[in-house]
């Protein structure tokens, strides 16, 4: 793989940019692999990457029914933060955030990580107490956050209206090194690095069944034929329940549409991310100038990648209270993804009832930020059979009542 650099761009310019090689090979399946990962979203690709980089396991296929990054990874609003309440969550999200800091260098691919700061507004007394508690917990966990006053909020975000008609701004939880990254680039960067290690990324290949023998997985049936494997990782987000059923077990997971929208591009007005969780809306500004807006999930289970219309109105109406300027913007486009949610709003990174089958899902509305940490931990779990980062996120915690309750930190209503 040629290294990307300023010199490489200059060199390629001399030949009219005709010398660029494909970023990843368009692989066709072999009959057998050491590891098959189902799902070429960020989590699946990161798992494959760290299997190769940290454990030297490179006879790996990542199988994707559509195109890589075409699931939630390419549909999210790119917020990265690690200000979670519970220790296991803070550990994995902070691991991810810190890996994001150097991900462009590690992958030799510009993922445009922008640590512009994430602010979670406190608009009720209850939220003030909750976020103050999170700030204290984060201090103990080594995650840098602080609770800031309304005056500080206004200094950082001049366009904000502190005296909203229903919910005045009473303060905020502020994480200065949180921010955003280019979501497609995260998938593309991992894909390129995996392909360079000799792994096969097989697109337009749907896994239709999981073949088993004596409590073990032997391979997968796909639209391109049967492929055998020693170990199987299921990393399919909104389709986790469907895939688990194919493998013969059930997951405590629900799937629902979550949508986002962008406005027409405008001049720079806001250089951080603001989340207003009481009124269910959040906003940031993209490099192109569009205001990127998201809200809560639809309140019913579904598999359509759209989201219902009334949510657009609800989200925007809520945001206008805190950001009156939004009322002057035109919506440019809207889209949705299918998110996979657990009862405690924490992910599942776990062994399964099948000996050599592992599952990584349940990231719900907030898994983009976790991609590098999740891949790091899940690769370790698949390679070694245990991982400190994943230990608490077993699927059996629901049977044992060891919940990791992050419903408040989740950031959006669901
Ligand atoms: C609108 C929206 C906004 C969001 N905003 C944020 C945010 O700001 N910050 C944040 O941290 N998170 C956010 N998220 C959540 C985040 O996008 C997800 O948690 C994360 O991308 C999940 O990544 P993944 O790799 O697990 O799943 P995906 O990227 O969905 O990848 C799973 C892949 O599996 C494939 N697949 C499914 N079934 C099969 C099969 N049978 N065979 C082969 N392949 C299969 C799918 O095609 C898909 O490509 C948002 C999500 C949405 C929808």
Image (spheres, rainbow, N blue to C red):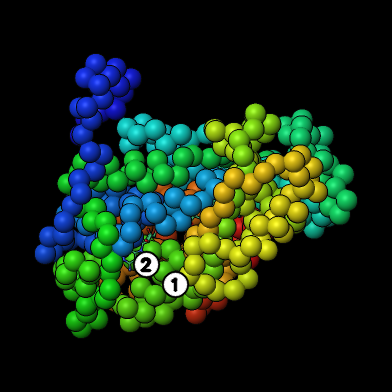
Q: Position of residue 45 (x, y in %)?
A: 33, 51
Which quadrant is home to the C terminus?
bottom right
Secondary element at tag 1: loop
Observer-side mark, 2 or 1, equals 2
**Marks 2 and 1: CB-CB under 8 Å?**
yes
Residue 209 vs 31, above or below: the answer is below
Q: Residue at x 30, y 46 (%)?
A: 191
- 227 vs 383, left or right, is left
Residue 291 vs 354, above or below: the answer is above
- 231 vs 189, left or right, is left
Residue 135 vs 20, above or below: the answer is below
Residue 412 vs 198, above or below: the answer is below
Q: Residue at x 83, y 41 (%)?
A: 162
Q: Residue at x 39, y 75 (%)?
A: 242
Pick the residue in front: 332 or 40.
Answer: 332
Q: Position of residue 44 (x, y in %)?
A: 34, 56
Pick the residue in front: 116 or 314.
Answer: 314
Pick the residue in front: 263 or 245.
Answer: 263
Does residue 407 appear in the picture of this structure?
no
Q: Give the label on residue 359, or none.
A: 2
Does residue 108 appear in the picture of this structure?
yes
Secondary element at tag 2: strand
Determine which residue is flagged by label 1. Answer: 395
Residue 7 occupies which quadrant of the picture? top left
Pick the residue in front: 294 or 171.
Answer: 294
């Amino acid at each position: 793989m040629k290294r990307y650099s300023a010199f490489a761009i200059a060199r390629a310019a001399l030949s009219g940019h005709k010398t660029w090689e494909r970023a990843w090979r368009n692989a066709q399946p072999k009959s057998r692999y050491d590891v098959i990962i189902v799902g070429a979203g960020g989590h699946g690709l990161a798992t494959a990457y760290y299997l190769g980089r940290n454990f030297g396991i490179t006879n790996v296929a990542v199988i994707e029914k559509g195109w890589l990054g075409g699931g939630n990874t390419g549909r999210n609003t790119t917020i990265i933060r690690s200000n979670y309440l519970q220790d296991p969550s803070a550990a994995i999200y902070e691991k991810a955030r810190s890996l994001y800091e150097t991900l462009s260098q590690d992958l030799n691919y510009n993922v445009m990580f922008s640590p512009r700061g994430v602010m979670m507004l406190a608009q009720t007394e209850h939220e003030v107490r909750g976020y103050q508690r999170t700030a204290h917990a984060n201090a103990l966990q080594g995650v840098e956050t602080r609770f800031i006053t309304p005056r500080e909020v206004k200094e950082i975000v001049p366009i904000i209206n502190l005296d909203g008609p229903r919910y005045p701004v009473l303060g905020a939880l502020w994480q200065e090194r949180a921010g955003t990254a280019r979501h497609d680039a995260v998938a593309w960067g991992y894909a390129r690095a995996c392909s360079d290690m000799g792994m096969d990324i097989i697109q337009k290949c749907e896994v239709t069944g999981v073949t088993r023998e004596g409590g073990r997985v032997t391979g997968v049936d796909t639209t391109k034929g049967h492929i055998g494997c020693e170990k199987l990782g299921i990393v399919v987000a909104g389709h986790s329940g469907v895939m688990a059923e194919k493998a013969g077990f059930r997951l405590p997971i629900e799937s629902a549409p979550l949508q986002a929208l962008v406005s027409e591009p405008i001049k720079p007005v806001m250089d951080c991310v603001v989340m207003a969780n009481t009124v269910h809306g959040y906003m940031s500004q993209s490099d192109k100038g569009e205001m990127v807006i998201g809200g809560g999930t639809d309140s019913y289970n579904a598999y359509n990648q759209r989201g219902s219309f009334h949510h657009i109105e609800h989200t925007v109406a809520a945001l206008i209270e805190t950001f009156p300027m939004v009322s002057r913007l035109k919506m440019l486009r809207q889209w949705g993804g299918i998110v996979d949610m657990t009862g405690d709003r924490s992910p599942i990174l776990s062994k399964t009832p099948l000996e050599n089958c592992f599952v990584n899902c349940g990231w719900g509305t907030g898994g983009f930020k976790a991609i590098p940490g999740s891949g790091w931990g899940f690769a370790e779990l698949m390679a070694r059979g245990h991982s400190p980062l994943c230990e608490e996120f077993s699927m059996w915690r629901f049977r044992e009542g060891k919940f990791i309750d992050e419903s408040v930190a989740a950031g959006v209503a669901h």
